[in-house]
Image (cartoon, grey):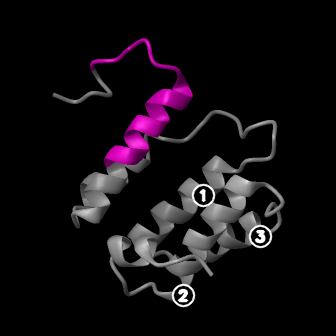
Amino acid sequence: MDPARSAPALSERQLGNLNFHKGQALAFDGDTAAALAAFKLCFRTAEDQNGFRWNTYLRGTIAFLSKDASALQAARDELREHAENMGNRFNLGKLENFVSHPEWSYAQAYSQPSK
């Protein structure tokens, strides 16, 4: 059973979070194709009013898994411009790990302490 399909009353944000964590579990397990499919369902129609750049982080995560170095660096650079937001700072650390270690698996790069 796919929990995302059985919960039609979820908000866009809740459904995105559910699919994001599904994507993370798949990426940690090394199933990149399925992880990418799940992550692509997580985009929000608008960025948060408080400056949290969810879609930017998501683009960087997808770029890492897709081995798209230029898109990954662009997402990292955009998050750097918005690092005053605590959530962006945390996610920036993950994108920095992805940029520094493009040859690593998602599990290896995500699990490293942020710089």
Q: Position of residue 23 (x, y in %)?
A: 35, 50
Q: Which residue carries the number 1 mark?
A: 57
- Name the image quarter holding the N terminus: top left
SS state under label 1: helix
Query: Hey, what amino acid is under mark 2?
Result: Ser
Q: Describe residue 40's horizontal placement relative to residue 79 as left or right.
A: left
Magenta residues, dominant SS class = helix
Of the pair 46 and 28, the residue shown nearer to us: 28
Q: Residue furthest top?
A: 9
Query: Hey, what amino acid is under mark 3?
Result: Arg
Using the rendered image of the protein, determine whether residue 39 is visible from the camera's viewpoint.
yes
Q: Callout 2 environment at 10 Å: few (<14), some (14 to 19), or many (20+)? A: few
Residue drawn at x 63%, y 76% as measured from the top left:
73
SS state under label 2: helix
On screen, 109 above or below 100?
above
Q: Describe residue 13's horizontal placement relative to residue 50 as left or right.
A: left
Q: Which residue carries the number 2 mark?
A: 100
On screen, 58 above or below 65?
above
Of the pair 90 and 12, the residue shown nearer to us: 90
Residue drawn at x 43%, y 12% as measured from the top left:
9
Magenta residues, as a range? 6-22
Total marks placed: 3
Dot 1 or dot 2, earlier in sequence: 1
Residue 44 found in image quarter: top right
Q: Which residue carries the number 3 mark?
A: 80
Q: Callout 1 environment at 10 Å: few (<14), some (14 to 19), or many (20+)? A: many
Dot 1 or dot 3, earlier in sequence: 1
Using the rendered image of the protein, determine whether residue 69 is visible from the camera's viewpoint.
no
On screen, 89 above or below 24?
below
Q: Position of residue 66 (x, y in %)?
A: 40, 69
- Mark 1–mark 2 distance (CA, rounded to whole Å): 16 Å
- Mark 2–mark 3 distance (CA, rounded to whole Å): 15 Å
